[in-house]
Image (spheres, rainbow, N blue to C red):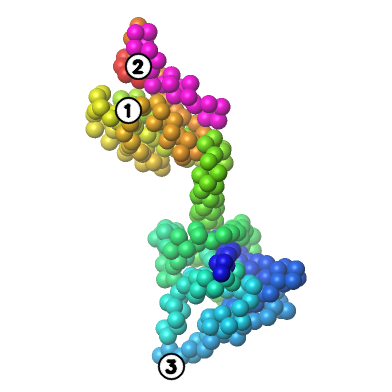
Amino acid sequence: MARGTLRVFLGAAPGVGKTYDMLADGRRRAALGGDVVIGFMEDHGREPTRRMAEGLETVPRRELTHRGVTFTELDLDAVLARRPEVALVDELAHTNVPGSRHEKRWQDIGELLEAGIHVVSTLNIQHLESLNEVVAHITGVTQRETVPDEVVRRADQIELVDLSAQALRRRMEYGDIYPPPRAREALTHYFREGNLTALRELALLWVADRVEEALQRYRGEQGIRAPWATRERVLVALSGGPEGLTLIRRGHRIAVRGAGGEFLALHVRRDDGLAEAPSAELERQRALTERLGGTFELVTADDVAAAVLEFARGVNATQIVIGASRRGRMKSLVAGKGVGTAIVEGSGEYIDVYVVTHEEAAHGRL
């Protein structure tokens, strides 16, 4: 039996329209002849969402009593017995009432997928486990319900439900999300424009990284070696000399020129252990790279230029930054081409190489 597919509508905050879009997706599938049911849907009293659910079959919820209070949850066994083609199951990160078969709704959804049922679900970015502390710092609110990032990353489709901070606040003011007293309080706390803008940025960046993962996986499966410039990714090749700080700063400036750009710094240690850079110098370079938001990597190889190029292609780098040669002209004539020249010659048509001048040029190794 083929495993079902998972589609997740991901939003930056409550009220952006995730449940509405989930239901609209279900209606489209049903109109095309698909067998679609609502396994669980929370309309939060929003009339447009309730109307969107009309006409779709709903599997009755299961009632559970906990500490004298009755709750309703997804009836997993009923959905499995109904065995639809597609089940709409809201709120992926939801924690089930004690007494349920699974602690979390994403575990319920996992069982539906194993049974070959396609699932469409919803999630807010603040419920991702890796972002929980960041969101708490931004909003001052700690989310108790989280879902492991890996669960969401394994989804077959993730669709970002995007709404600007200003548009979301207008929806709040019109009473489309919460009733007026609660809306007024929310607008001065969680739904402040700065909070919403930061949450939206987080959602966009998280989805971009997920797309990048899928792209890298596809390139690997297809044996594609040439970089695809989906975003600027700058690799700074460090010899370990003092010019490294200059190169790192230049690489960072190049990377941030475009939206979503990133940079990495790489030092290749030779297999023979010769000409190894002082560790204190490398530690300074590592610290600067990380302060600027980059990633610092160390690899060992006997061919430095080949290792730099292999690493660049492996991370889908679009540009490599190297320092101008610190070898004198006579030394170059005697010893042959240096690492920098080999990188330039081997970069091909898909990777640009920037040669940066510095005070140490013509006084040393690279």
Residue type at numbered disc 1: Asp
| Disc 3, SS | loop
Left or right placement of residue 57 versus residue 304 in this view:
right
Residue 59, x across and y down, in percent: 62, 83
Mark 1 vs mark 2: in front: 1
The residue pinned by badge 1 equals 302
User: Which residue is farthest front?
Assistant: 1
Image vertical order of residue 161 relative to residue 226, above or below: below
The residue pinned by badge 2 equals 326
Residue occupying the point 39% across, 60% down: 133
Q: Which residues are magenta?
A: 332-360
Q: CA distance from mark 3 to mark 2?
A: 78 Å
The residue pinned by badge 3 equals 68
Q: Of label 3 and label 2, which has the lower sequence position?
A: 3
Q: Nearer the viewer, residue 241 or 318?
A: 318
Disc 3: CA contacts within 10 A as few (<14), some (14-19) or many (>=20): few
Left or right placement of residue 114 versus residue 166 in this view:
left
Q: CA distance from mark 1 to mark 2?
A: 20 Å
Mark 1 vs mark 3: in front: 1
